[in-house]
Image (cartoon, rainbow, N blue to C red):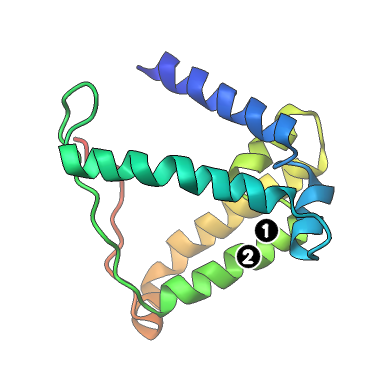
Amino acid sequence: MTLLYLLLGTVFGFILSRSGAADYDFIQGMFLFTEFQLYGILAVAVAVTAPGIWLIKRRGRTLLGRPVTIELKALHRGNIVGGVLFGVGWSLTGMCPGPILVNIGEGKLYAIAAFAGALTGAGLLGSFYSVVQRPFGLPPLKVGTGEG
């Protein structure tokens, strides 16, 4: 199964690379409203994914028969603050997590700084979660995938 995930991730990365979705200039252009290609890519992603998730939820099982539950997450201040931080980081670096790895794979050294920043930010949140949990009304932290 790991090999399948590696293959799917590679295909996804290739599509991100070839479509321009991992290109700094395209991403900056999207945020400056001078490039509209990425808005189309995002719209296609939603149009393809939404029916798939609907089918998975309706069926309640994966193609291999494993049970699936998709729970709605509660809206709280942490979602807003996290979304703003994510958007600011995306705008400044021109990368979100997937494109960071694509850019590293393309040999763009500046992506290593973005990767280090993402890891540092995740580590800091994990370290200080108990400090920010109450002021932002965050839910209890779940560690791991829950699959054993």
Residue 28 placement, left or right of 47: right
Residue 131 placement, left or right of 112: left
Query: Total number of numbered labels?
Result: 2
Where is residue 147 shown, x and y percent of the image? Answer: 21, 36
Residue 137 placement, left or right of 69: right
| Residue lying farthest to the bottom in this orientation | 135
Q: Helix, strand, or loop for circle 2?
A: helix
Q: Quadrant of residue 28?
A: bottom right
Mark 2 highlights which residue? 87
Residue situated in front as seen by the camera: 5 or 148? 5
Where is residue 29 shown, x and y percent of the image? Answer: 81, 57
Report the disc number at residue 90.
1
Instruction: Look at 60% across and 41% down and name the residue there.
Output: 98
Where is residue 125 shown, x and y percent of the image? Answer: 48, 63
Location of the C terminus (image quadrant): top left
Task: Please indicate, yes or no, whether residue 116 appears anywhere in the rendered image.
Answer: no
User: Do the residues under discs 1 and 2 have CB atoms within 8 angstroms?
Assistant: yes
Q: Helix, strand, or loop for circle 1?
A: helix
Instruction: Give me the C-alpha separation between circle 1 and circle 2.
Output: 5 Å
Please say if 68 is above or below 33: above
Please say if 121 is above or below 37: below
Q: Amino acid at mark 1?
A: Trp
Q: Residues within 10 Å of mark 2 (few under 14, many from 20)?
A: some
Where is residue 95 shown, x and y percent of the image? Answer: 69, 50
Location of the N terminus (image quadrant): top left
Residue situated in front as seen by the camera: 50 or 129? 50
Q: Amino acid at mark 2?
A: Gly
Residue 29 placement, left or right of 7: right
Q: Residues within 10 Å of mark 1 (few under 14, many from 20)?
A: many
Instruction: Look at 82% across and 35% down and name the residue there.
Output: 108
Report the disc number at residue 133.
none
